[in-house]
Amino acid sequence: MSQLFNQSQYLVSAYRYDQLPEDEGQEIAFVGRSNAGKSTTINALTNHKGLAKVSKTPGRTQLFNCFEFAPGQRLIDLPGYGYAKVPEKMRKHWQKEIDYYLMNRQSLIGVVIIMDIRHPMKAFDEQMIHWAAQSGLHSHVLLNKADKLSRSEMTKALLTTKKDIAKLSQTTTCQTFSALRKQGADVLSATISPWFVNNDE
């Protein structure tokens, strides 16, 4: 497994776009519904159990949480779409801030789209895949919580999701994942590490 992300350190949390680090270097955003397990996924990828704060209550990531693993190279944990049980004013705030981030962030080179393998390809997931393809960004789908399914169910879900993705994008990759058991963390690391390397060339 690549050691690239093992040096990740917490950098800053931002409530608004203008509180993010300078828009330079390279960064990957982790996106997904509020209960998809984004924070746990980042911890599994970085091999750092407490790096991204994890809560049993979905939607506790209500800030842009930024982690740096090398100078100018970052992982960004975005607030979950779906926004769990938060006030309408908060939902509107995050919709505005996330939309602005995705449309304007020059240092954004790719997105990791995290889904619950039992409920994949919701409307916003599809929109993210299509948007990333149209924008020329790297994109990779994680079917998280694979430990909740049998091997045959997991294989079926993966094949079905790949077919659905192919209707939206020819470049988006997909894998099964279990953040809880760190299954697939090596594949995730091997998939997104070259995004940074290739972008420098």
Image (spheres, helix red, strand yellow):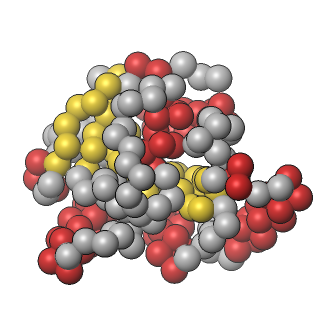
Please, which residue is most extreme toward the left here?
18
Q: Nearer the viewer, residue 19 or 90?
A: 90
- Is 192 on the left-hand or right-hand side of 13? right
Residue 73 seen anywhere in this rendered image of the structure: no
**How far across and how far down the image is residue 15, in percent?**
15, 54
Residue at the location (32% across, 25% down)?
9
Percent across and percent down for residue 58 are: 40, 60
Q: Is residue 39 above or below residue 87?
A: above
Q: Percent x, y for residue 197?
A: 50, 30
Q: Is residue 63 left or right of residue 108?
A: left
The front one of 58 and 154 is 58
Q: Nearer the viewer, residue 136 or 22?
A: 22
Q: Residue at 48% x, 43% y: name it.
A: 40
Q: Considering the image in quadrants, where does the N terminus appear? A: top right
- Residue at 20% x, 80% y is 88
Residue 76 appearing in the image: yes
